[in-house]
Amino acid sequence: MLNYIIRRVLYAIPILIGVNLITFTLFFVVNTPDDMARMHLGVKHVTDEAIVKWKQERGYDKPLLYNPELAGLSKLTDTIFFEKSVAMFVFDFGHADDGRDIAYEIKSRMMPSLAIALPVFLLGLLVYITFALVIVFFRMTYIDFWGVVLCVALMSISSLFYIIGGQFLVSKLWHLVPISGYGSGLDAGKFLILPIIIGVVSSAGANVRWYRTIFLEEMNKEYVRTARAKGLPESIVLFRHVLKNALIPILTGAVVVIPLLFLGSLIVESFFGIPGLGSYTIEAINSQDFAVVRAMVFLGSLLYIIGLIFTDISYTLVDPRIRLQ
Amino acid sequence: MNPLVVFILILTLTGCSDALWNNPYPSEDAGKNILYNAFAERPKHLDPVQSYSSNEILFTAQIYQPPLQYHYLKRPFTLIPQTVDIMPMVHYYDEAGNRLPTESDPAAIAYSIYEISLKRGIYYQPHPAFARDELDAFLYHNLTQKELQDIFKLADFSEQGTRELLAEDYIYQIKRLAHPRLHSPIFGLMAEYIIGLKEYAEVLRKEVEALPREGYLDLRKFPLEGVEVVDTHTYRIKIRGKYPQFIYWLAMPFFAPIPWEADRFYSQAGMAEKNITLDWYPVGTGPYMLTENDPNRVMILERNPHFTGEYYPTEGMPDDVESGLLKDAGRPIPFIDKVVFSRERESIPRWNKFLQGYYDASGISSDSFDQAVQLTGQGEATVTEAMKAQGIRLETAVAPSTYYMGFNMLDPVVGGRTEQEKASARKLRQAISIAVDYEEYVSIFANGRGIPAQGPIPPGITGYREGKEGINPLVYRWQDGKAQRRPIEEAKALLAEAGYPNGIDRKTGTPLVLYFDVTARSVDDKSMLDWMRKQFRKIDIQLVVRSTDYNRFQDKIRKGNAQIFEWGWNADYPDPENFLFLLYGPQRKMGNHSGNNAANYDNPEYNRLFEQMEKMEDSQEREQIIDRMVAILREDAPWLWGFHPMDYALYHAWFQNVKPNKQSYNNMKYLRIDPVLREQKRREWNQPVIWPIGTGVAVLVMSLIPGFIAYRRRERKIELRKLSA
């Protein structure tokens, strides 16, 4: 397995370079270094000299990908792409265009994002699987029918509606929790209850239906028939046998997102005033801050790759037949 | 644990205390003299040499003290001393260095000297940069990496110090305008005026190149020709020629003092990585200091314990007595101990928290406009009954800004190339000026929050005229005591005179098509663009909208490729020069990227009058020249004058001394709140409603029971089947 992990880690390098190159190309197709300087310096009283100075200071005065004026390897290394990309592979994200340290920013925003995303993920998994199993247990009954109807209804409503509706009812009308905000330590609890509940409820429809499908498919397998033939109660069949065997598809969807939980959610964080990472990339794109965009895309890709490796490893844990080579 | 149980548990625990459940602030702060405010965009810069946006100056203006400030109550805006004893004295000199009388011909003035004398006894906020040991050496100016290990924010430094404000601190900041690592937005402008600043930047550039990235450049070692320390509390600034508007810059944070100790302290290796920079932690002499800076969540200003000697104004405008704005006259300021700014990206939570009393003031988004504001029979805006019942009041102020629609004067159709074309294009622009109904625009798209403009100068600034004499006669008629837009037939007649009868080009016989360049719009703006097309269609002109991203839009403007475009301007200072220069020929964008004349308008007579006006002090003669300039502009119509936006803001009953304006930002020190009334109202408005929790639990239990019964029944059935088998 160790060889497999090493091989996957090595595969990650060209993937990350590729992602970096695509991000770089897409970003600079839309924005030129001059545009970035103007965005940063503002529109009032900006001189051409100030733009040149800004670019020089941040290394944006060099060619993008290829420097024909230099000789040898410098043709490739003395470019914006090379200089801005290499450091990231040792996790040196550098500074944002406003001078702030990106690593510091990511570190300080990661925890609030995680404070919502992790409980939503864990609680969600528990609730969705439980409900899906209950629906499957009562399959072909009115509970199954109305459960599916409810899921479809939940799926059809925009997540924004849950947020605004939740804030309106729970915070504005009933005054039970603050509408928005964030606190440190235990004080954060009262701010997190509502976004977590909304996070779980808003994704319930799609997830419960997905897990229901998985469980129903599993229910038709021969080992389930054998278990029933042995006279096992339906609850044992479902919760002990079906659940265990359905874990592979569940893990495929679930484990891969675990590392990405750090990146937060844009809408939830915006509406609840959570100082997380959710809006960092969007803010950077709007302010044409390439340093932040490339750092966040790099981090996102890296976490996704880590998530995939974790998924592979988790397969071996739940299914002894799988061996990573 | 079941989330519902956790929820109930937390609510129960919270319920045991006296605190309000939905209070977003620590319960121990209840009833304290704290002002609660919100901000949407995080400030990029808090270093006064770089900060320029209003969301940055909101903070820096409370912390830093430039020599001058605007009188809080007087209108039009009046400059008064802030850290100086008296207003700066200006002396003029000729080329030979001979002093000239004040009324001298501006052409004879080679340079002006502003002499500024500071008050004594002004001290900086407590800050580690000033901390000294028993031997009087600075404690934190030579920190090692080891010493920095446990430092993560400014508050981690155990010792703090202060010192008196000196003239050299102002000089130090002026030198920082030229610092190659700082990118001051006004460096280019100031380099034209402050003698030697441009060359100084070159000197510093060479010095910086030899320094490591975080090395300290001691600006005291490098003299700048245009500034001089006369004594510990007096300094001079030498300006090229005569530039009367310079005095306004002395009221902006760009000219606030920076102590060299702070610059030295923040330049140490390892500080920037922890965001311990002057850009993050300001050091000022103002009434407040930034004690918490987490711009993603909260920024807190607290009273500077060393701030003394300033009092609430004793005079204002006649209405101010009636509105209670002079109740605190002569009392020492600031009144508020702490200001908490919470980040609220979305308007809905911000609005609801204001209604719950958790924010003391609020702007009005278009979503909540109808809920908050109603118009009286006289067309006056006032709060709705629901707001009135909560004791909320509305304050309005016209912003010193203008939103206009510009014509590119280099375009052959709307600008013209030959004299004949130019005359024809002028008629076309005049026709469009009548057709585009900005009264309707303001009513539909700004909820009435704006004043249709009669020229480039907004209200409250010299040159703006009220009533009949202030209307743009080309677009309006004075009828029944108010300005009435001219009928569309007049616009059609002008269009025909321009060579486009019924919107058809007389020469080619083709319909007249014009192009409106806009930045990429959201779906919400579609109705506005449709409305704009409709306005042009009133005179049979087809308007084609060319939407692009902001970068390309700016590029088009710089290259003179746009035909009709929208833009706006916020005043730097309350002088008509700051608006009229937007149409000054040498400021043309085309061929001069730093210019601000996006319309590329160039009228020799206007240019001559501008050059004359900008060097003049305020006087009757200057006003006459301004009137003449505005008349030229109205005739030429290089812009559709658009509108001047009005700011509407709501304030709770406990919020006092509010006189909103968009020119001066250091107003926090004048504000006062009644925390007892606020606490009482919060309790009244935010009592928790418990029954939904009980109902929710009951519904959950009730829905589980049939499920449980069905489960038992099914299990029993299986058992029976097993037995029968």
Image: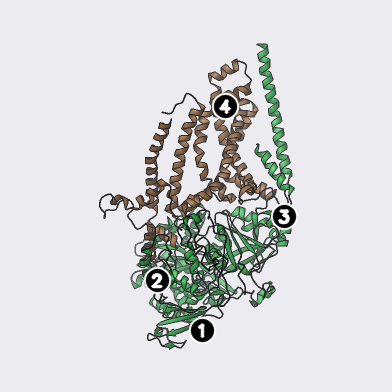
Residue A53 x %, y %: 38, 63
Q: Mark 2 points at which residue?
A: B587
Residue B676 in the image: state x and y as whole percent: 73, 62
Disc 4 versus disc 1: distance between alpha carbons?
A: 89 Å
Q: Name which residue type carries label 1.
A: Gln
Whichever of labels 3 and 2 marks the residue nearer the N terminus, that label is: 2
User: Mark on residue B685?
Assistant: 3
- CA–CA distance between discs 3 and 1? 55 Å
Judging depth in this view, the residue of B389 and B641 nearest the camera is: B389
User: Which amino acid type corresponds to the residue marked 4 in the rendered image?
Assistant: Leu
Q: Residue tagged by mark 1?
A: B620
Q: Would you name the residue on which mark 4 appears? A: A243
Chain under callout 3: B
- As drawn, the chain in brown is A
Q: Do marks 3 and 4 share a chain?
A: no
- What is the three-letter code of the residue carrying label 3? Trp
Quadrant of image for the N terminus of chain B: top right
* Residue closest to the eye, B640 or B25: B25
The C terminus of chain B appears in which quarter of the rendering?
Answer: top right
The reply, left or right, for residue A97 in relation to residue B469 is left
Closer to the N terminus: mark 3 or mark 1?
Answer: 1
Q: Drawn colour of chain B?
A: green
Work out which residue is located at the far top of the displayed protein and give it. B725
